[in-house]
Structure formats: structure tokens, C-alpha cells
Amino acid sequence: MSKPFVAAFGIAIAVIALLVWQGFISTKGNHLEPKGQIGKVRAQKVDDNEMIAIIDFKLKNDADIPMVVRNVEASIDTADGSSVNGSVIAGTDLANFFRNYPAIGEQFNPPLKARDTIAGHQTVDRMVGVRFDLPEETMDKRKDIVLRIEDITGPIAELKAK
């Protein structure tokens, strides 16, 4: 191989690598990776085998594109290792819950619901109410409470707290 060919080939490889790298850098903000943390979990006994948990949390969208909520789910990891799924309470019903159970405290944040949009590079404080079919003792002895927030394009933010 001639020396000019090797030099030209090396320069071509470097230019191609630079273009590929630039492509990765320029599309970095197009990938949703929502993150967040649960701030506070408040629980209220409604019946012998029914608890309502109010979960206050912070959700951050670092992407350049908005996040649109498709689904919100919550579950509890119990002390015996099992998992109990909860039913998310509609945002409009939460106002009645806070009115009927003043011991739970006040509503600090607006509820997160399906089709809510979180703009790119925005952090929001929200809350959800979740109904669990389990006794108060099981709720008090839980290992974790897990909140999953799914975007319409598929990415999921999974938040955990005690």
C-alpha cells in the first residue's frame, strides 16, 4: 500500500467517526429518561381492609421533547415479600377524599393524571392517590411503595420510597 493511500484512508475514517459522533451528540435530547423521587407518603385507613395512600413526588424530564403521561400505577412490596397492586384514584375524586378525611392533611400538589404533559427540561411536583386492598398493619410494615409513570412513547419512570 502506498503512503498517500494510507493517509487518505486514515483521514476518511476520522471524518466518518466525527460525523457519527456528531449524530449521537445532536440527538441526545430526543431520548426520554424521566427521573424522580417520592417525597412523602401519607396513608389513611378507610375500612378494615382498605387503605388510601397519598403519594407526593417530584418528576423530572431532562429531554428536549415533552413527556406525555400514558399510565400511572402503584404497588406495595409487603414485609413478607409479596407485591400488592393499587388502584389510582381519579384526580376529581381526590378533592372529596381530602374533604372527608381531614386527618390526612392538605393537598400540597396537583394530581398527576393521564395525558398530563411535562415539558422538556422541566421538573414538576405532583401527587397521586392510590387505593390498596390491605389492612393498616400491612401498610405500616411495608418494605417499599413503587410508583410507575409511563410515557406514551414507552419510557417508564419508577419511583420508590418506604
Image: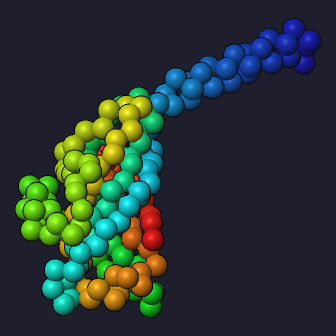
151 vs 143, left or right, is: left
150 vs 60, left or right, is: left
Judge by depth and name the residue closer to the eye, 96 or 116.
Answer: 96
In the displayed structure, would residue 19 be above or below residue 42?
A: above
Q: Position of residue 65 (x, y in %)?
A: 36, 31
**Could you tell me if residue 73 is visible in this image?**
no
Q: Position of residue 117 (x, y in %)?
A: 25, 39
Q: Quadrant of residue 146?
A: bottom left
Judge by depth and name the residue closer to the eye, 57 or 85.
Answer: 57
Q: Residue at x 33, y 72 (%)?
A: 75
In which quadrant of the rendered image does the N terminus lie? top right
Judge by depth and name the residue closer to the eye, 118 or 26.
Answer: 118
Q: Residue at x 69, y 16 (%)?
A: 15
Colour convention: rainbow
Judge by depth and name the residue closer to the eye, 31 or 4.
Answer: 31
**Could you tell me if residue 138 is visible in this image?**
yes
Q: Residue at x 39, y 48 (%)?
A: 58
In which quadrant of the rendered image does the C terminus lie? bottom left
Q: Position of residue 43 (x, y in %)?
A: 28, 73
In the displayed structure, would residue 104 be above or below residue 128?
A: below
In the displayed structure, would residue 66 be above or below residue 116?
A: above
Q: Position of residue 137 (x, y in %)?
A: 34, 89
99 vs 114, left or right, is: left
